[in-house]
Amino acid sequence: MSKSSVPISDGRRERRPSGAAVATPVHSRLTVLSGPSGVGKSTVVAELRRVCPDIWISVSVTTRRPRPGEADGREYHFVDDGEFDRLVAGGALLEWAQFAGHRYGTPRAPLNEKLEAGVACLLEIDVAGARQVRRAAPDAWLVFLAPPSWDELVRRLTGRGTEPPEVLARRLAAAQDELAAAAEFDITLVNTSVQDVCRQLIALMWQ
Ligand code: ADP
Ligand code: 5GP
């Protein structure tokens, strides 16, 4: 896989002129972390933020309401439907998807700014979003986070206690489809230990 892409502008990949005197990373500076709801993506991202502050983590916009403990601008930018529509219409989102009744999207401008500066960037998004990033930035690394087992996924999602039963059911139904998409990704990491996954991710992003 060629690893010389530069930031995303309008969905097309640009390439540096050959021989350009830049510190070209081994791979694109953009990594995508996806996986079923409840597998531990947010937990891994929080640990990554703690142990490797050099990695920039995109803050998505979403129309879902904040969970207890979530702060606007930290976990997400929480917006209403009208604002989300405006962002989509204005081309402000690199990708967006509907997930379990709400919309989620990646703001394009801050990501581009970091990529332009050569910063390693991570998106934590769903599988539909990862597919869109694949099209917009073919050199991005797509990492699938898998649970050790289906039963463990159900335990984690239920144990988190953040969703009412009907939302839980929608997320588990979506999880079955998402697990089936693992083969589309460049690599699968099994989230048995958060620390191990972080170490593997850091190694991938800095190799
Ligand atoms: P996601 O962001 O993928 O929806 P979360 O990060 O919210 O998932 O994790 C779901 C639940 O699983 C949380 O209660 C979290 O503490 C727990 N969890 C995450 N990773 C692990 C792990 N490696 N072992 C055990 N529990 C985990
Ligand atoms: P949650 O509501 O549990 O925070 O997130 C639900 C799902 O939306 C998760 O799979 C999460 O990865 C995904 N998600 C979060 N932000 C984005 C985004 O910007 N774009 C897309 N496509 N999915 C996102």
Image: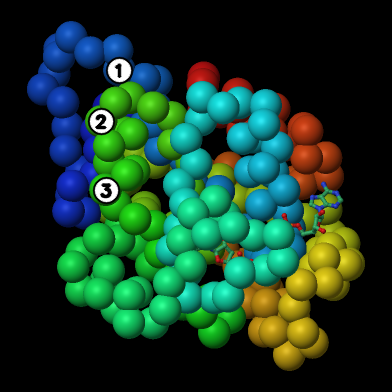
Residue at 83% across, 40% down: 193
Instruction: Classify residue 150 by image quadrant.
Output: bottom right
The quadrant in which residue 146 appears is bottom right
- Disc number placed over residue 36 in the picture, else none: none
Residue lying at 56% horizontally and 27% vertically, measured from the top left: 53
Is residue 115 depicted above or below 133 in this figure?
above
- Mark 1 residue type: Thr
x and y percent of residue 71 in the render? Answer: 59, 58
> Is disc 2 placed on a helix, strand or loop?
helix
Q: Crowdedness of circle 1 by 10 Å Cα count: few (<14), some, many (20+)?
A: some
Residue 197 visible, this angle: yes
- Check disc 2 and give the amino acid type: Glu
Q: Is residue 77 above or below residue 163?
A: above
**Label 3 neighbour load within 10 Å: few <14, some 14-19, many 20+:** some
Q: Which of disc 1 and disc 3 is earlier in sequence?
A: 1
Q: Mark number for residue 24? A: 1
Q: Which residue is mark 2?
A: 116
Q: Quick check: marks 3 and 1 in contact, CB under 8 Å?
A: no
For the rendered model, the colour scheme is: rainbow
Q: Establish if 154 lies above or below 149.
A: below
Name the quadrant of the N terminus.
top left
Residue contact at pointers 1 and 2, CB within 8 angstroms: no
- Residue 152's spot in the image, x, y percent? 87, 62
Q: Secondary structure at mark 3?
A: helix
Residue 127 in view: no
Residue 155 placement, left or right of 163: right
Q: Is residue 146 left or right of residue 56?
A: right
Separation of residues labelled 1 and 2 (CA atoms) = 12 Å
Which amino acid, by three-letter code, is at mark 3? Ala
Q: Residues within 10 Å of mark 2 (few under 14, many from 20)?
A: few
Distance, label 3 to label 1, CA atoms, is: 21 Å
